[in-house]
Amino acid sequence: MCPTFVLFVQHLPSGIARQSASALELSTGYIPTLLTASALAFALAWLSSVGGMGGGVLMLLAFTALFGPQVAVPTLTLTQLVSNGGRAWYNRRDVRWRVIKWHALGAIPFALAGGLLLPYVPGEPLKRALGAFLIAVALWRRLRPTPGAPADKTFAAVGAGAGLGSALFGAAGPLAAPFFLAKGLTGAAYVGTEAAASLIIHLTKTIAYGAGSLFSLHVLQLGVALTPAIVAGAWLGKRTVMRMNSQIFVLVVEAGMLVAATLLLAGV
């Protein structure tokens, strides 16, 4: 253990010092777990950057298995802030800001409400409903491969559903995915726009979770520890998208939707 850090902890106010020392002792026993989480965070940040979605659902599954559900959801929020911020930045020239504006109008109030309701609302029925919705949308897209593009104002309702779902069970990127595809977004335009929309949701959730005292010192430490892996994964994902054509990109996104739907229906 680093002597300098020990001295720093000893000079903190007593309550904070006890909490910091306890969290530090806990984390030293979690080094293999943190290494595993970092490797998964890198891979799933890459997946999110390539397909624009799906990584959050899988990351929630991984974090729940590694850290437990009470730590997983707020930790995922912190990591998604970094992941979506990186994706939005790397693809900033292709973001459709008018769509983002309407999406944010619905997402912000519903993400805030969902974050405050999280301790009181059972998420399992919502997960299965979202899974069924995604399968229905995937089938609809196969039957109608060229649907009419939704109006910009439609994304206020899309944002409301995504914001509420994301706040209640961690990730709802797949819910918005078919609407971004129907809008004609592919490649960097899809990844950047979806990331910017999700970033607004996760910023709002951070405020709500903070108000609900869901961010412990342990959660904050995990968020910081996983940040380098997530930034690296987002960067590699951007490089990968630059080499994909639009047809392959759409197939990747639809495959991600089906994987996410299967996991949600299974109650994962």
Image (cartoon, grey):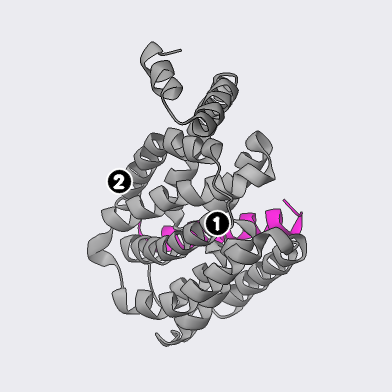
Q: Is residue 260 magenta?
A: yes
Q: Say which of 50 and 64 sits in front.
A: 64
Q: Earlier in the sequence, mark 2 or mark 1?
A: 1
> Hey, what amino acid is under mark 1?
Tyr
Q: Residue furthest left?
A: 93
Q: Which residues are magenta?
A: 245-268
> Hey, what amino acid is under mark 2?
Arg
Q: Residues within 10 Å of mark 1 (few under 14, many from 20)?
A: many
Image quadrant where residue 97 sits:
bottom left
Q: At which x and y percent is residue 210?
A: 52, 55
Q: At which x and y percent is residue 13?
A: 46, 31
Q: Secondary structure at mark 1?
A: helix
Rendered image: mark on residue 209: 1
Above or below for 190 versus 238? below
Image quadrant where residue 189 sits:
bottom left
Rendered image: mark on residue 107: none
Residue where numbered disc 2 is placed: 239
